[in-house]
Amino acid sequence: MYEHLEYLDDRCELRCICGSSRGITFRRRDRYALKFNFKLCAKCGHVRAANPLSESASRRFYTSSDYRSLYFPGQSTESVLRRKTPPPNTRSGLLRYAERLNIGTGKIVEWGCGGGWNLIPFRDAGWDVMGFDFDRTYINLGREMLGLRLFEIGDGIDPASVISSPDVVLINHVIEHVLQPDETFRQLRELCTEETVVIVGVPLLETIGIWHWRDFFHVAHIHYFSRRTFLKVAADAGFSVIDQSVSDGLFALKRSAESPRRSISPIGPVESALLLCKGFLEPRFRIRRTISYLLRRLGLMDFVKRLRRNLP
């Protein structure tokens, strides 16, 4: 399946967000059976892939659309865009979260927008939308098929020259993909005014159950934040949290005065270890999977489905 992706073997060594090079390896393959060392830091409790793709391999991974091809094998880029684009006037979870913050319609910039599908509900609700991404293919598709104002990162355009006083900066399921999340946050901070709200969507250790253990760890994600470690990175980069919804993996941030790095809590490693154990065990899901497996092996799945449909 990955014969044309030899560059995925081009790796680097990554220290923890706290600077430690050590950690407890608890998993050695990702959801696609690619070899990675997933480590729990015994110093701060952060979880990371200690041997992620190198910077050059990562750039190729995202600019070539190989990233999306792994998620949607055998599908054309056009069909992926259509699949991910919500129907007109959809009130997406991200839009509802912004409305909950009482921001009102305004100017929203998405960093890591793909083809711009997250921006469609905002545009339909009256927002002025703009997006940036590395993937030229999806940027062009978003422009042509969705009529969005999208820009390619690294295409000679200085984002600061295009972005002017955004009301919201959206970075949804992106920060876990970058090698140095603190640097990315600092770059975004320079695009924000004191009133800009940064909405961050991120998969957390607390929400492993949404994806399930087998699929949660994979090549595209480098960092696996808990609520605690995410708040540390955000604070160290000069942001304060104004709202959080841990069950949805959503945070709202604003610029704050530069402050010393947050101290590391000694309970962080214990807390993260417990979250990993909970995500691994997930008894209800594993029982359902086991029952489904047995029914398929015994040839009884169709019978059970018919029986359920006929129940009052």
Image (spheres, grey):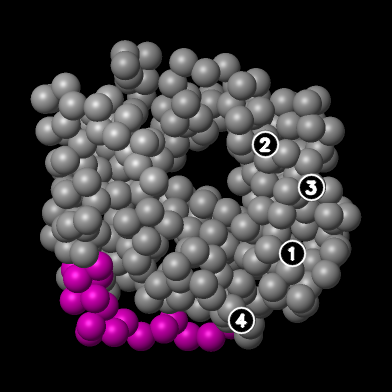
First in sequence, mark 1 or 4: give its number: 1
CB-based contact (under 8 Å), mark 1 and mark 4? no
Q: Where residue 125 sits: x, y (%)? A: 83, 55
Q: Amino acid at mark 4?
A: Ile
Q: Give the extent of the magenta segment.
A: 258-275
Q: Earlier in the sequence, mark 4 or mark 2?
A: 2
Which residue carries the number 1 mark?
168
Q: Position of residue 311 (x, y in %)?
A: 35, 42
N-terminal of the pair, mark 1 or mark 2, is 2
Q: Amino acid at mark 3?
A: Asn
State the residue at coordinates (56%, 29%). Answer: 63
Q: Is residue 264 above or below residue 188?
A: below
Q: Earlier in the sequence, mark 3 or mark 1?
A: 3
Outermost residue to the front: 312
Q: Secondary structure at mark 3?
A: loop
CA gap, disc 1 to disc 2?
20 Å
Please name whichever residue, 7 or 121, is drawn nearer the observer in this view of the structure: 121
Instruction: Classify 145 as above or below 169.
Output: above
Inter-mark Cα distance, 4 to 3:
27 Å
Q: Would you call the spot at circle 4 few (<14 residues within 10 Å), some (14-19), or many (20 or more)?
A: few
Q: Which residue is mark 4?
A: 242
